Image: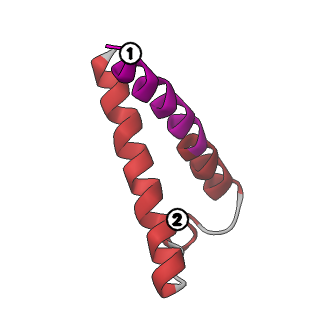
């Protein structure tokens, strides 16, 4: 389970870096690499799902 948590954290960090680039430089790295099509939507969906998984991980660590 720890491997899945680390993978989710990495994907979430990459998504946060992308949003930082969008906010600061108006540069979308995901669309630059994958285009504006369906693959970019899949990447955004994966980032959203991993963010939700990380919320669960956060609450598990707070209870410990």
Q: Which residues are magenta?
A: 48-64
Q: Dividing the image into 4 quarters, which one contains the N terminus? A: top left
23 or 39, which is in the foreground? 23
Q: Position of residue 39 (x, y in %)?
A: 63, 53
Q: Residues within 10 Å of mark 2 (few under 14, many from 20)?
A: some
Q: CA distance from mark 1 to mark 2?
A: 35 Å
Provide the secondary structure element on which disc 1 rests: helix
Q: Which mark is residue 4?
A: none
> Does 7 appear above or below 21?
above
Q: Identify which residue is drawn at 37% across, 23% down.
A: 62
Q: Identify which residue is drawn at 54% across, 84% down.
A: 26
Q: Identify which residue is drawn at 35% across, 34% down.
A: 7
Provide the secondary structure element on which disc 2 rests: helix
Is 63 one of the magenta-colored residues?
Answer: yes
Q: Residues within 10 Å of mark 1 (few under 14, many from 20)?
A: few
Mark 1, residue position = 63
Please tell me whether the stretch drawn in magenta is mainly helix, strand or loop: helix
Q: Position of residue 46 (x, y in %)?
A: 56, 41
Is 54 one of the magenta-colored residues?
Answer: yes
The tag earlier along the polypeptide, 1 or 2, is 2
> Does 18 appear above or below 38?
below
Q: Nearer the viewer, mark 1 or mark 2?
A: 1
Answer whether labels 1 and 2 touch (C-beta < 8 Å): no
Number of numbered discs overlaid on the protein picture: 2
Q: Identify which residue is drawn at 58% across, 69% down.
A: 31
Q: Dividing the image into 4 quarters, which one contains the C terminus? A: top left
Q: Position of residue 34 (x, y in %)?
A: 55, 64
Mark 2, residue position = 30
Q: Quadrant of residue 16?
A: bottom left
């Amino acid at each position: 389970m720890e491997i899945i948590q680390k993978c989710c954290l990495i994907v979430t960090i990459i998504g946060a870096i992308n949003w930082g680039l969008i906010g600061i430089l108006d540069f979308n790295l995901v669309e630059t690499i994958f285009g504006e099509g369906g693959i970019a939507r899949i990447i955004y969906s994966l980032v959203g799902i991993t963010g939700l998984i990380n919320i669960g991980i956060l609450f598990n660590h707070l209870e410990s």
